[in-house]
């Protein structure tokens, strides 16, 4: 029977299949890689301790410190005592249970979804989980990767498996060539605007089409990263030469004869021509433009050429009410052109757009320019290795010369758990993934954009593309 | 885990869609390393508004939350469920739930019930008219009843069985230990390890 890419990876990992009756339709899925961070794991390790259970496969588990860590003065103790206890708890748990940890200031430290791929730990056909919804990032390699809660973190630590019902399959086809200046971030924001924040619910999305195949691995990770913002369980892209070229030679990638063996297995990882998707959506790449969100959920976005919509223009009463509330929270007036909205803060970073390619794009815009007077600009590498690479290329000098703040690795201003936050009423052009109320700090106003638009906005003082500078 | 069989209680109507987990429990609360005490943080940003429905004394003591579509969207934080249960909720009714939130709920004996928007709207109207209106969430018969109305709901048979009996998922999985070991013996040798 014809199968999708996700079906094939799922079938490769089903330890037992749902047998119906009291067992329901739940398969027991083997997990190849379990990534752990300080926020969603302490209660899971506590559960193991209470039950007297060990970590079944510490060799398939990796921890890093990312959500709470400050991105400046990193050699000092963490100032917030509650954050410090959480980070120290992770260190204690990893030592007790034998889990490898990349702590703050270690050259391997970084955002969990940047660390896995850069080490070559994320590979095609694997199952990857983490107590973090943006685990979908790893699907860019043709892996099934999804976020889990703390009870499931404990379950995977104890058993290296998860009981899960097989999701439905959805195809998102992006065909054609992206216009100049339109990036992976704009593609995924357009997808979310098209299908809505719940459009992918219960599904694994497979991104397909010539525009997706033309993306770099960094771009593919950006697209898969935000699958969760479309409500999907996971996002995937079939592996190809781009994937193999990225992986080859990385520390944990297979070597020698094992590489050839892996390559043979990976070559089967594509949806069969006659595979059936429960749902299918097609976007024309040529029509896409840089995207800017105006509201408080990621589907509330328009192109940079657009205006803040009239709430009355939404036919659905729920969407209309949500738009009204969003405009009040965001301090915006319907009808305002996006380009005329003044911005006071710019954040380039996060598991969505904190990779070397993203920093190169931002540096290309800022090189030889200066950010607008009074503008606060944070450039935050996704990992210490990204930081080292950027500094090797001299990008840090470009950022500093432009008046931007070059920081150390972490989740930073994506989520308001560390010192990098917005104050109430501040307006941020952010390359992160969520524009929820208070996401970047209580009362802060978040607009999601690509690194190119973020950097151009830093110079212009209002939303802009690099071409307009 | 506490079993969930049948629950009857009064309800709070939360007429909002896309209620994300950052609103249910703001990130500042996620720094805690305990599983308890999150009720104080439930909707803490929204509760600063005196007009927010959780501040309406007519609904004090409610144990069933009625919400718009796409409830629990966003982050994977199980703290959202811990906040709802710690506050006193036993179930939430919505036309659609985010997948991770739904899974987290099941692990805590907290029931997310997916029902048509029209039915939830009718319950909301009834509760707004009379906050003493009781709603019954019946997992044994897979039915929600209240205000003279009733509606069936669907749930995976395995999930229902575990909830009705309060079973520990990890202990259940460990019954398949021989299968897990056999699977591990077959895994390809090129797969990576973290050490």
Image (cartoon, helix red, strand yellow):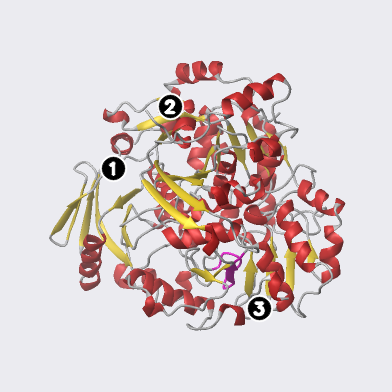
Residue B35 against residue A275 in the figure, above or below: below
**Crowding near the residue tagged with mark 2, few <14, some 14–19, many ≥20 C-alpha atoms within 10 Å:** some
Image-based side of A111 in relation to A15, left or right: right
**Crowding near the residue tagged with mark 3, few <14, some 14–19, many ≥20 C-alpha atoms within 10 Å:** many
Q: Main secondary structure of the magenta part?
A: loop
**Picture coordinates of residue A216, whole percent (x, y):** 66, 48
Please tell me which of labels 1 and 2 falls first in the chain: 1
Q: Spatial distance from mark 1 to mark 2, Cα to Cα?
A: 20 Å
A443 within the magenta span: yes
Mark 2: secondary structure = helix
Could you tell me which quadrant the N terminus of chain A lies in?
Answer: top left
Residue A318 occupies quadrant: bottom left
Residue A393 against residue A101 in the figure, above or below: below
In the drawing, what numbered circle is on residue A462? 3
In the drawing, what numbered circle is on residue B155? 1
> Disc 1 vs disc 2: Cβ atoms closer than 8 Å?
no
Residue A241 against residue A187 in the figure, above or below: above
Q: Nearer the viewer, mark 3 or mark 2?
A: 3
**Residue at 66% across / 27% down in the picture?**
B193
**Closest to the observer: A104 or A108?**
A108
**Picture coordinates of residue A376, whole percent (x, y):** 73, 73
In the drawing, what numbered circle is on residue B173? 2
Is residue A347 visible in the rendered structure shown here? yes
**Residue at 45% across / 76% down in the picture?**
B49
Residues in magenta, as a range: A438-449
Q: Spatial distance from mark 1 to mark 3, Cα to Cα?
A: 48 Å
Q: Spatial distance from mark 3 to mark 2, Cα to Cα?
A: 54 Å
Could you tell me which quadrant the C terminus of chain A lies in?
Answer: bottom right
**Crowding near the residue tagged with mark 1, few <14, some 14–19, many ≥20 C-alpha atoms within 10 Å:** some
């Amino acid at each position: 029977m014809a199968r999708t890419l996700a079906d094939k990876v799922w079938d490769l990992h089903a330890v037992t299949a749902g047998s119906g009756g009291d067992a329901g339709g739940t398969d027991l899925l083997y997990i190849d890689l379990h990534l752990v961070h300080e926020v969603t794991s302490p209660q899971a390790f506590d559960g193991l301790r209470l039950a007297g259970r060990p970590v079944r496969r510490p060799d398939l588990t990796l921890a890093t410190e990312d959500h709470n860590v400050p991105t400046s003065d990193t050699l000092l103790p963490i100032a917030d005592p509650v954050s410090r206890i959480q980070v120290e708890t992770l260190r204690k748990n990893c030592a007790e249970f034998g889990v490898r940890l990349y702590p703050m200031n270690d050259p391997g430290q970084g955002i969990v979804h940047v660390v896995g791929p850069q080490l070559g730990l994320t590979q095609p056909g694997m199952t990857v989980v983490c107590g973090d919804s943006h685990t979908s990032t790893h699907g860019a390699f043709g892996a099934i990767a999804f976020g889990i809660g703390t009870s499931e973190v404990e379950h995977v630590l104890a058993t290296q498996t998860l009981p899960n019902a097989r999701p439905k399959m959805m195809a998102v086809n992006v065909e054609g060539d992206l216009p100049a200046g339109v990036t992976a971030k704009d593609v995924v924001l357009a997808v979310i605007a098209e299908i809505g924040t719940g459009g992918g619910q219960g599904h694994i999305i497979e991104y397909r089409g010539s525009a997706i195949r033309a993306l770099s691995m960094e771009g593919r990770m950006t697209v898969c990263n935000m699958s969760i913002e479309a409500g999907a369980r996971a996002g995937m892209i079939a592996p190809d030469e781009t994937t193999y070229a990225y992986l080859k030679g990385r520390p944990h990638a297979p070597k020698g004869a094992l590489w050839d063996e892996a390559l043979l297995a990976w070559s089967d990882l594509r949806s069969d021509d006659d595979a059936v998707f429960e749902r299918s959506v097609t976007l024309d790449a040529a029509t896409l433009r840089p995207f800017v969100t105006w509201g408080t959920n990621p589907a509330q976005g328009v192109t940079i050429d657009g205006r803040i919509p009239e709430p009355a223009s939404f036919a659905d009463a729920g969407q209309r009410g949500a738009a009204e509330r969003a405009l009040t929270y965001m301090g915006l007036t319907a009808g305002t052109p996006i380009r005329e909205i003044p911005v006071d803060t710019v954040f380039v970073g996060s598991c969505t757009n904190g990779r070397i390619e993203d920093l190169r794009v931002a540096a290309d815009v800022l090189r030889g320019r200066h950010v607008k007077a009074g503008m606060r600009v944070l450039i935050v590498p996704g990992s210490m290795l990204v930081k080292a690479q950027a500094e090797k290329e001299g990008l840090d000098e470009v950022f500093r010369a432009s008046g931007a703040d070059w920081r150390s690795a972490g989740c930073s201003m994506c989520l308001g758990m560390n010192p990098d936050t917005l104050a109430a009423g501040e307006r941020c052009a952010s390359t992160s993934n969520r524009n929820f109320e208070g996401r970047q700090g209580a009362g802060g106003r978040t607009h999601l954009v690509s690194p190119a638009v973020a950097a151009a906005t830093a110079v212009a003082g209002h939303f802009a593309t690099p071409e307009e500078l | 885990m506490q079993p969930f069989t049948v629950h009857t209680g009064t309800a709070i109507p939360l007429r909002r869609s896309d209620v994300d987990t950052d609103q249910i429990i703001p990130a500042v609360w996620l720094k805690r390393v305990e599983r308890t005490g999150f009720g104080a943080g439930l909707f803490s940003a929204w509760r600063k508004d005196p007009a927010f429905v959780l501040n309406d004394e007519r609904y004090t003591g409610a144990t069933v939350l009625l919400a718009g579509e796409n409830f629990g969207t966003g982050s994977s934080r199980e703290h959202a469920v811990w906040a709802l249960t710690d506050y006193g909720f036993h179930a939430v009714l919505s036309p659609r739930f985010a997948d991770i939130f739904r899974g987290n709920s099941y692990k805590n004996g907290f029931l997310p019930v997916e029902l048509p928007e029209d039915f939830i709207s009718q319950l909301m109207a009834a509760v707004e008219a009379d906050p003493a209106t009781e709603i019954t969430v019946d997992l044994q018969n897979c039915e929600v009843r209240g205000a003279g109305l009733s509606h069936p709901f669907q749930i995976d048979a395995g999930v229902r069985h575990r909830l009705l009996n309060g079973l520990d998922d990890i202990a259940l999985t460990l019954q398949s230990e021989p299968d897990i070991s056999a699977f591990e013996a077959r895994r390809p040798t090129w797969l990576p390890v973290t050490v």
